[in-house]
Image (cartoon, rainbow, N blue to C red):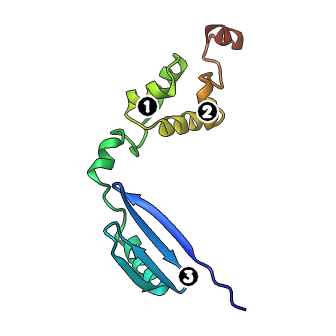
Amino acid sequence: MSISFRKTLQWEVDERSFHFTTDGVVGELQTPDGQVITLSMGEWHAISIGLTELGPVAKSSKYKAAMPPNVGQPWSEELDAHLKARWTDGADVRQLAAEFGRSRGGITSRLVRLGLVPDRQSSDSRIPAVPPPGRSDETRAESS
């Protein structure tokens, strides 16, 4: 009795679908135009290593245009201070993402790192983890 398996990966790049199927020995890549490239898994592995050594691939212009302008940029002490002030003033994650040119996930992660919310899900509630100076928890609850 013989048992075989197949693994399939599917992904899209610029709205074009790619399919990769392997039985562990041979891998087949089907391109969007229907072409099939068949190589041994050793050959696919060598290609993978070569691509990794080339470094990050430039993202398509469509992808870049869809991303906020400051995604991936470092945060400065000044930006952190401004983010803290805006969060304390009541701005929500969507407003902050637009204002700082960052993704909502980037804003949320920074709020956690700065200790303004205990975890990523807490930013949805819009209540800071630590009351701003001069405000008690009761005051925050009343003003929400």
Q: How many marks?
A: 3
- Residue highlighted by disc 3: 23
* Residue 125 to residue 76: above or below: above
Q: Circle 1: is it few (<14), some (14-19), or many (20+) Cα within 10 Å?
A: many
Q: Position of residue 114 (x, y in %)?
A: 57, 34
Q: Work out how far the residue at label 1 is from the one at label 3, CA to CA, in angstroms.
A: 44 Å
Q: Residue at x 59, y 30 (%)?
A: 123
Q: Can you name the residue that lies furthest to the left here?
A: 61
- Vertically, is 40 above or below 96? below
- Using the rendered image of the protein, determine whether residue 73 is visible from the camera's viewpoint: yes
Q: Which residue is mark 1?
A: 97
Question: Quarter of the image holding residue 137?
Answer: top right
Between marks 2 and 1 in the image, the one whose residue lies nearer the viewer: 1
The amino acid pointed to by label 3 is Asp
Q: Inspect the image, locate mark 1, and give the three-letter code of the amino acid beneath it.
A: Ala
The quarter of the image holding the N terminus is: bottom right
Q: Position of residue 84 (x, y in %)?
A: 51, 25
* In front of the other: 3 or 95: 3
78 horizontally vs 134: left or right: left
